[in-house]
Image (cartoon, rainbow, N blue to C red):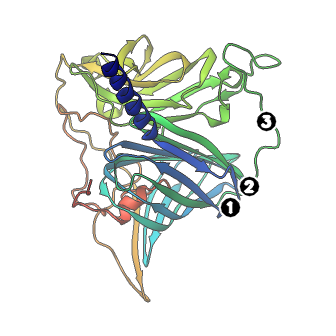
Amino acid sequence: MVRLRFFLATIMCICLLVGLASAVSVTVSPDVIQPNEQITISMSDLKNDSVFTLHIESEIALGDTSDFKFRASSLKMPFGLKSAKITVDASPIEPNSEVSVKAKTGSTIKSVGTIAEGTSVHINEGLGDIGIGTVDYVEVMGTTPSGSKVETVSMEIYGKKAGPDSSAITFSLSGITQGAAKVIIYVDSSEAVAKTVYIGSAPTTTTAVPDSGGSSSGGISTTTVSPKSSDGLAVLSATWGAVRNANPDGLAVVTLPGIAAPSNWRMIAGTYAISPEATSFDPAATFSLTIPATEAADMAKYQPFLAVYQNGAWTKVSGTTSGNVMSVQITASGKYAIFTENLVTPATTITTTTQPTIVITSTVTGGTSSPTSGTTPAVGGSAQQTNVPVTTKASTAAPTTKAAPLALISVTGGLLGALYLCKQGFRR
């Protein structure tokens, strides 16, 4: 009996050690870069079919100019992503001004432009299966409202990983002489890394970050930090001095796929995670989620509610509703979504969105130029993507043919899908 117990204990220890050894490890380096210098995201033990989310959010100091240009160069994606999606947000944007996104790989340059209807531009696009490859550069250009000091561009790509377990994503940034880039990675809905890389130089002064339960010296600052998701549907609002265990400048809202809804619920907005995961708020912060326009028309029938994901399960939380925006007071980071119970089947509707679009596609091959066929979706023209397909509503009208190589442009690697799209699947 003693030998049996010893044997079982040994097996349990081995299993524990194996589990620890196989945990995902992600690092981002260096801490500070100069324009055109490389950022490296190193990963180990990232298993196939893990749900991988990469969020990069860049702040561009504008100085005396209202035009901005953001470029990511030599973007290398060392593994593929199955069923990949991309979201992009740029704000503030001068209303009715043109925003363009351009990508170059080899001898091919592809561009998409749109006229901003408001003060921000959103992209939400499915990429299918994307493969391994390198993009020469990805460029985002636009005009900000007069008097703007900072332009924020956030981009995400997510999908199921396929390829080497250990590898590194590399890219360099230009168009930013002084600023910062938040690099955040989630694996299977758990935060693997959250880091701010400074461009030009690190801040010369640091802001004290009080521990949980305390107050910053001099009282609570009234300055508000308001990070939002890449699709613009989730916004965190907190006073600077209320942020605990994190630098307020490093706060971000990340879109997470892959968290299933309970069998009797249907997810209509979310899931959104507040990063870093260790952050707490005193006094409480406000987290607001907007019901997508394609869902809001039937909101009265849905009877929507907010829920938080904790310990592997969704739990309803009390919140307030104003129009199609639902808000909740929070004292710590978390993962939130809007649901409805599957009790009422809403009427089928068809919503068509008209978006003024400028599309330029060209191929440069040894001095010759020829247009690339296909229809490219307008920036911001895609319907909001949720984690669980909406089976009771018709899809938003959309072109039946797409130029898959553009697939809507991400510094995070989404362009890889555009330029190396592969429909044959991936070898596990």
Residue 198 location (% of width, % of height):
69, 49
Is residue 381 at all visible to an observer of this figure? Answer: no
- Work out whether mark 3 precedes mark 1 in sequence or the reverse, and give the earlier one: 1
Q: Secondary structure at mark 3?
A: loop
Q: CA distance from mark 1 to mark 2?
A: 7 Å
Q: Compare residues 139 and 307 and report the one nearer the observer.
A: 307
Q: Secondary structure at mark 2?
A: loop
Marks 1 and 2 close (CB-CB < 8 Å)? yes
Is residue 22 at all visible to an observer of this figure? Answer: yes
Q: CA distance from mark 3 to mark 1?
A: 22 Å
Residue 111 location (% of width, % of height):
44, 66
- Work out whether mark 1 precedes mark 2 in sequence or the reverse, and give the earlier one: 1
Question: Does residue 319 appear to the left or right of 201 in the view shown?
Answer: left
Q: Secondary structure at mark 1?
A: loop
Question: In the drawing, what numbered circle is on residue 206?
Answer: 3
- Please name the amino acid that badge 3 sits on: Thr
Question: In the drawing, what numbered circle is on residue 200?
Answer: 2
Question: Does residue 105 appear to the left or right of 178 in the view shown?
Answer: left
The part of the image, by quadrant, that contains residue 357 is: bottom left
Q: Residues within 10 Å of mark 3 (few under 14, many from 20)?
A: few
- Above or below residue 348? Residue 111 is below
Q: Compare residues 222 and 37 and report the one nearer the observer.
A: 37
Question: In the drawing, what numbered circle is on residue 35?
Answer: 1
